[in-house]
Amino acid sequence: MKLSVAPIVLNHYFDTDKEQRTVLEFFRDCGFTCVDYEIRPQYIQDDEQLHAKKLRENLAELGMTAPQAHAPIVNPFDPESDWLTVFRRSLEFCKIAGIPQVVIHSGEIKGASKEEFQAANRDFYCSLIPYMEETGVCVLLENIGHYEQDYYLKNGAELREMIDCLDHPMFGACWDVGHANLYWKKDCEQYSSVVALGDKLKALHIHSNAGYFEKSHRHHRIDMHGLPYMSLYDSVNYDALIQGLLDIGYKGTFNFEVNVPVKTVRYSFEYEGEIVRKLEKLPLDLAKQYNTLLYNIGKHMMETYGIFEG
């Protein structure tokens, strides 16, 4: 299995509009040859999709691939959003860039029951089918939501149910390991969810957090997007995940969606009338060491199970 990475963290270091190749070279130097490409809204504004054309050229020249992408996060049930244009253009972006599949989040509906959520999102996703068929780009649904929402796609069985309801071969699943871990194994255990997804599982978002504890007991449901082994309380069970992937014959990449090494959430500190940000992020050379460690952790996991592909 090949290792992959979502390069979104470098948005804090580079102008990713203009320095696309530099970003790709950074991760290639860390060991990664596959990326989960984030389609930022500005990438799909120009008529000719120049960013997508350049991406295809750079990937080919660097010996890299983008097996999957992530569309901008837009709620299709927000009456003020131009969601159809955003997602249509995202599919066109992927076609131009040579990316075969893209993650598009389900829409959030406040106060919705499961039946209402499924019906509305079924209509939303089905509206994308003509553009999927025209571009040849598949759409992946992701398990994402917040435990205080009335309903969301929480585990593998619910995600599979939604995909089966769409009844079209170009829909699949992206299993987000960290999101599942927030709700603990009673509802979202990794192995059973992966097995439930079966042949519909096409991609992964892998990151760690401390999972679910009672509110009075240490961390409580924080979507940390951290490295594996980041903490004593990092509770993702990677043995369960990988065994599930093996049992279903998963063919995709082992893709990390890790936000390091930038502190995007911290208390503000003011000194002598100025906000101090000196240690808000690591220098670029240490950021490279951090992501090289991420690659080596993934390599260790894959080699332990005898499935590493360089």
Image (cartoon, helix red, strand yellow):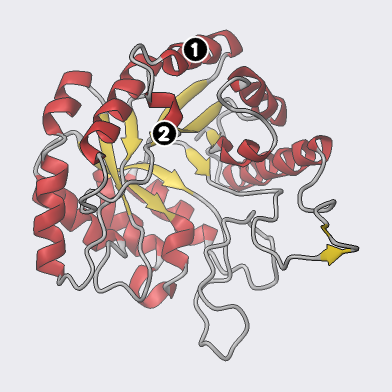
Q: Is residue 269 or residue 21 the one in the foreground?
A: 269
**Camera sees residue 145:** yes
- Which image quarter holds the C terminus? top right
Q: Is residue 117 above or below residue 56?
A: below
Task: State if disc 2 and disc 1 touch (CB < 8 Å).
Answer: no
Question: Taking 115 as reference, is 64 left or right?
Answer: right
Q: Is residue 114 or residue 1 the one in the foreground?
A: 114
Crowding at mark 1 (Cα within 10 Å: few <14, some 14-19, many 20+): some
What residue do we see at 25% from left, 54% from top? 107
Question: Taking 71 as reference, is 287 left or right?
Answer: right
Number of the label disc, if any, that sits on residue 54? 1
| Residue that label 2 marks | 41
What residue do we see at 67% from left, 48% from top? 260
Mark 1 or 2 closer to N-term? 2
Q: Position of residue 219 (x, y in %)?
A: 60, 78
Question: Taking 82 as reference, is 28 left or right?
Answer: right
Element assignment for label 2: helix
Q: Is residue 251 above or below residue 105?
A: above
Looking at the rendered structure, the kind of residue marked 1 is: Lys
